[in-house]
Amino acid sequence: MITLEKYHPEKIEEISAPKSRIKRMLKDYMRFENRIYWWMLGKGYHPFAATLAKYLLRITVSCILIYVIFNLSVFTFKVFFLMGVVILMAVASHSMHRHSYYHRY
């Protein structure tokens, strides 16, 4: 019989209740923040400095995500805009070629 004492409680929780990938990532990130906080306290940093580092890390990661999402949206807009321009130029070119002087007999 397998006893649960040898497994870490977080592993038991993950096995018993599978969650979405985003929820797992957020939970792992919060665990990472707490690990940094307790590591700083263990190294002798002031509790305020450890708390400040924890929240500054959260703000930094949020800013990076906002930057990435903004750049992806701008890139997507540029791609669709250029596709529209290319399609319009192709339609205009076809229309001009079709109604050109040399095709009239």
Image (cartoon, rainbow, N blue to C red):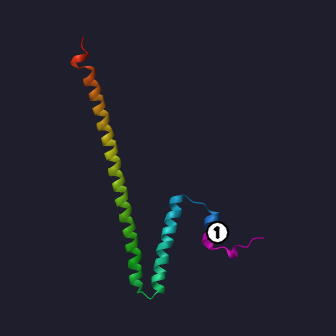
Image coordinates of residue 20 in percent, x first then y, are 55, 58
Q: Quadrant of the N terminus?
A: bottom right
- Residue placed farthest to the bottom in the image? 44
Asked if residue 3 is among those painted magenta in the image, a careful observer would answer yes
Q: Left or right? Give the position of 7 relative to 28.
A: right
Total labels: the figure holds 1
The residue at the point 30 percent across, 31 percent down is 90
Q: Report crowding for label 1: few under 14, some 14 to 19, many 20 or more residues within 10 A (C-alpha).
A: few
Residue at the disc numbered 1 = 12
Quarter occupied by residue 68: bottom left
Image coordinates of residue 77 in percent, x first then y, are 32, 46
| Amino acid at dot 1 | Ile
Image coordinates of residue 29 in percent, x first then y, are 48, 68
- Residue placed farthest to the top in the image? 105
- 7 or 90, which is in the foreground? 90
- Residue placed farthest to the left in the image? 101
Q: Is residue 19 above or below residue 96?
A: below
Q: Is residue 93 above or below residue 71?
A: above
The residue at the point 25 percent across, 24 percent down is 96
Q: Is residue 40 above or below residue 7?
A: below
Q: Left or right? Give the position of 1 relative to 57.
A: right
Quarter occupied by residue 58: bottom left
Which stretch did the figure color magenta? 1-12
Image coordinates of residue 74 in percent, x first then y, are 32, 51
- 92 or 64, which is in the foreground? 92
Asked if residue 31 is among those painted magenta in the image, a careful observer would answer no
